[in-house]
Amino acid sequence: MNKNTKYLILSLLLLTCGFISATGQDDYDFGIYTKAGIKANISKKISNTTELEIRTKDNTTKLSNFRINTSFGYKFNKYLSTSIGYAYIGKPQQEISLGNQVLVEKSILSSHRYWVDITGSLPVSKFSFSLRERFQHTITQGASALVIRSELKVQYKIDNSIFRPFISVEPHLFLNDITVQTGSAVIENVKATPLREIRYNIGTVISINEKNDLQVYGRFTHNPDFKIKLMNQELPIKNMDQFILGINYHFKF
């Protein structure tokens, strides 16, 4: 094991300890995201990725949601690629308290998400810089959310190592307000800022062999506070920031 690899492993361990210690803070939440998937090269330019993902919340004590994703990618050249995809998102029953109102989502709350993105990449020496622009449309119980997600990512290639560390930032820009019908109550998002989520990631891709790779990352998600309108009454909502430990596995063929 070379010196760079030892430093990388130590950094990831410290990062993990920092995220776990955040679970003791009342102002933050901690969750674990696990994903397993298959990447298939249909041709030299076309590929398909299908994944199952599980997400937890409330300091990993509750299931946040599960997702089934599938996408098709097309690579124009080493600098430019695009993809389209679909995700089914299932959220378990949950209770939400808003003032004197208690809203209960029964059984599984289903969402359907569609997206299209384009990614530009630029290799510079051992670094790789990329910018991805994604437009996504999520539909939940008739409510429609239109979002642009821009991800700027920098990845570094370590000589003679299976590790490829990276950092990235991903702001979420919402293009519309959302009205949701829950039982007899109507929740209308009236004063949320367009920039409602920013993700900061640091981690590494681990190339186990030609067919298997693992990605381990830490994420800090900042969620700005906002206001909603519930039955003609405006209520402030404190959006809790979140620390995430993520583990993704892919089998390639």
Image (cartoon, rainbow, N blue to C red):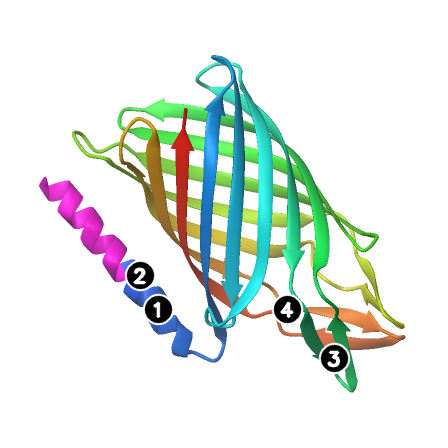
The quadrant of the image that shows the N terminus is top left
**Label 3 sits on what residue type?**
Leu
For label 1, count other residues whose C-alpha is less than 10 Å away and answer few (under 14), some (14-19) or many (20+): some
Label 4 element class: loop
- Which residue shows up at 42% across the image and 78% down it? 25
45 shown above or below 97: above
Which dot marks residue 16?
2
Label 1 element class: helix
For label 3, count other residues whose C-alpha is less than 10 Å away and answer few (under 14), some (14-19) or many (20+): few
234 or 208, which lies in front? 208
The answer to whether the residues at label 3 and label 1 have Cβ atoms under 8 Å apart is: no
Q: Which comes sooner in the sequence, label 4 or label 3? A: 3
Q: The magenta stretch spans which residues?
A: 1-14
Q: What is the CA distance from the residue labelled 3 to the residue labelled 2?
A: 34 Å
Verify whether residue 10 appears in magenta. yes
**Label 1 sits on what residue type?**
Ile
Q: Which comes sooner in the sequence, label 3 or label 2? A: 2
Specify the farthest residue to the front.
Answer: 107
Q: What is the CA distance from the residue labelled 3 to the residue labelled 1?
A: 29 Å
118 or 142, which lies in front? 142
Nearer the observer, disc 4 or disc 3? 3
For label 4, count other residues whose C-alpha is less than 10 Å away and answer few (under 14), some (14-19) or many (20+): some
Q: Which residue is mark 4?
A: 225
The answer to whether the residues at label 2 and label 1 have Cβ atoms under 8 Å apart is: yes
Q: What is the CA distance from the residue labelled 2 to the residue labelled 1?
A: 6 Å
Which dot marks residue 98?
3
Say whether residue 235 is left or right of residue 11: right
Q: Which residue is mark 1?
A: 20
Nearer the observer, disc 4 or disc 1? 1
Q: Which comes sooner in the sequence, label 3 or label 1? A: 1
The answer to whether the residues at label 4 and label 2 have Cβ atoms under 8 Å apart is: no
